[in-house]
Amino acid sequence: MKKNRIVYYLGAFGINLIIISIIFWFNGLVPFGNNNFLTSDLGTQYIAFLTELRRQLVHGNLHLYLFSQSLGDNFFPIISYYLLSPFNLLLVLFKAQAVPVAADVIIMLKISAMGVAMAYFLTQYFKQSRPSNYIFTIAYSFCGFVASYFYDLMWLDALIMLPIVAVGVMRVIQDNKLVLYYFSILLSIIFNYYLGYMLCIFSVCFFIYLALENNLMEQRTRFVTIRNYLVTSLLAGLSSAVVLVPTLSGMLKTAKTSFNGFNYLPSARFGLEAFTQLGIGGNTFIQRLHHGPSVFMTSTVLILLLSYFFSNRVAKSDKNHSLFLIGILLISMFVTTFNTVWHMFQNPAGFPFRNSFIFSFVCIFVAHKAFSAGVFKDTAAIIKATCTAGILIVIGYATEWLIPKFIEKMGYETPDNAYNSYYFWLSLVCIVISGLLIMLFSRNKYFGIELLLIISFEVFANFNSVLDTAYLGNQKTYSRQYRKENDILTDVKDSSHPGHRIIVSKSGLNSAFPDQYNNYNDPVLFNINGLSLYSSTLNQNTMTMMNDLGYFSFNVRRVSYFGGTNITNSLLGVYFDISQLDSHYIVNEHYNAPTLGFLVDKNVYDFQMISGRALDNQNRLWQSLNGTETQYLKNASITTMSQKSVKNRTMYTYQLKNEATGPLYFYVSPFNYHASRIYVNGRRINTPQIQVQKAAVMDLGDFKKNEAVEVKILTKKPLEINPSYFRSLDHDEYEDTISKFRNNSMKISSDLNHDVVNGTINVQKSSPLLLSIPYDNGWSAYDNGKKIKIHKVISDLMAIDLDKGYHKIELKYQVPGLKAGWIISIVSVLIFAIYLGFNKYLNKKYSNIFVK
């Protein structure tokens, strides 16, 4: 018997592995080809974070603060959201340049593990380990959610845990056993707290469903069962505090805490076009940001699901219970209010209906109930269900094709691009074939093989509809360019000093990517101290401060190196600007900046940013740091300004006179560089590959004092005769300050790859030590072993007061909330253990009373 169970689960794993291997092989994806999925979040975020995790695991240097996250930030929120899957331990088996290969292997293994988890649930609920279960395990493992979002691999763990959570809830109700439910909820939250939260909501819905199905309220032990469920749920949640508390502390510093009342209005999220999601090709990669709920479940499952409600073989009460569960999940996606609650009270920024996999799981479960009830023998019900399935697909496509204007007027969400008619006809053909095979299965069980084949074909076709429209990267190019750039950056980092930052303004790695790659996370990828970051965990205060200094941010999840000036490079310790040209790397600039800690004037404590005035902020900031009123950034003189219309835009021509020898900067907020053209003395100023569509400082070049400069700007934005648009940096005045700051810099002795910063400095006069590290209550500062106060300055940086003399400075970082999280988790685990013993004692006591 035990051997049969092993074969059964190996079969569930193996069939899924074979299918996903064929899909990847067909598309030439690694490890079966040279293509990799260097696009969307996988290419722009996960690969970099997985590479950093691998680096820490391989070197045994686990640290929770990264200076490669923009100016530096708490790494724990990224770990808890992206990296806590146990599958990620496989990264140690791959080289850094092969992390994209590792990601594909992990995806394949997770999809295969989903089949095992679903097979386990079906066995526990239906008490049978039959081969026909594979029909439903395949449908679940390759449901619409997986096909649409497989590259968001951190979410896939939730699909492994969902069936186990369902079994755990069953054990609580049917057997009064709590351990499986406790650990399934606990691990779901730990592996990915975002979808783990959704599984907690699902557990409530499934508990109510099973309570209705098992007539719980008519049993004498009903209150004990409800108490056990609630207490176990609470303790499982509290036991995950080691992850939740520090993560919450970190996420409160992001823009995700903003409130939008429109996300709670009881409006409809989709219309009849959502029925297209039931067929093959309902989603494509191009539609990933805006589409209906991804609920593809194969034609066989859809027909069985519908027949469950058509057939007289199913009791009315069972239909009502299943309809309740499906209805609750459907409404939670359809009504904006509930959908927002399911998504942790935030409207998803792209990738909508992230809870759709739960709906698919329940539909597949109900379809199996129909199968177990022998509904496939009810020919009339199967015919009705087949016809209904076809009609739903027709309605969906008819709505999408014939009345899109009506959908828009009703306020329903519509996909960005039209559907492929090929998938419409293919879906109808598969529905007809599946309906026929289900009816034939009632006469001969060997038709189950054909059912398995048609389901395998459908999931292959649906998965391929996403990959067909995705742009794939090149693994050989990625591997080659990664090694080359990593070697260059390692040499450059070694030639600079600890405590400096490096910009890579043009990367050779971009050639490996299939579409626009903006290098936001290259500092994390190559373990260098940079400025940029692309993450859902981006610190809002850091982003705002950098915006106010002139750096570009596309949205609240991105901040770029573009927009920096000599002043900001010195402020933030930028030492090198590296770029790739004709397969060679060159050092564009050697800023010779001070380190991340240098002595400044006490006026730094009074400095305040003004939004939308980056160059003015820089000038006033440099005055504050130096304790002077010197104008470091001087307004250029505008001698004349003319304008003329050019098609739908206006050409503004400025005749300027430079007021200082040095670089000339341009800044207007907001300003779309991507949609504009700027010419200086007839030469076009090229914007970076990043599409700068909002405010950022632009360097127009170096000019001498009193030199005449002609600037032409072709744009849709109305401009004025405003001298503050153009400011020149007085090079001589600036250089004097840099020499002073550099000579009064802290000498960093630590490598910044730990949660500690060590350094020394000799202070000639009592002064603040400005640290270009974002302010975070996780930092503690020690001067010659004595703890001292950290001040928040310049919106988001740190400063400490130092007296005259020699100082040994030590900064220690402890993740805020981590200690409290550990305490709560340990106490909760102990309470659960005590509660288990108490519960076992009561059960034994009541059993003895019952026996007597």
Image (spheres, grey):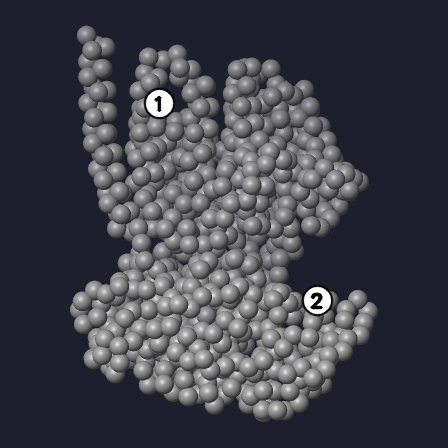
State which quarter of the image contains the C terminus.
top left
Q: Residues within 10 Å of mark 2 (few under 14, many from 20)?
A: some
Q: Quadrant of residue 423?
A: top right
Task: Measuring from the top left, give residue 648's x and y in whole percent.
Answer: 79, 66
Residue at the image position 71 percent from the left and 50 percent from the top: 417
Task: Measuring from the top left, give residue 830's x and y in whole percent.
Answer: 21, 37
Q: Is residue 660 above or below residue 533?
A: below
Q: Which residue is mark 2?
A: 717
Task: Measuring from the top left, give residue 317's x and y in whole percent.
Answer: 53, 15
Q: Secondary structure at mark 2?
A: loop
Which mark sits nearer the N-terminus, 2 or 1? Answer: 1
Q: Which residue is mark 1?
A: 226
Q: Does 489 sit left or right of 436 as displayed?
A: left
Q: Is residue 724 above or below residue 588?
A: above
Residue at the image position 60 percent from the left and 73 percent from the top: 667
Q: Residues within 10 Å of mark 1 (few under 14, many from 20)?
A: some
Distance from disc 2 to disc 1, alpha carbons, whole Å, reads: 63 Å
Q: Does 45 sit left or right of 666 as displayed?
A: left
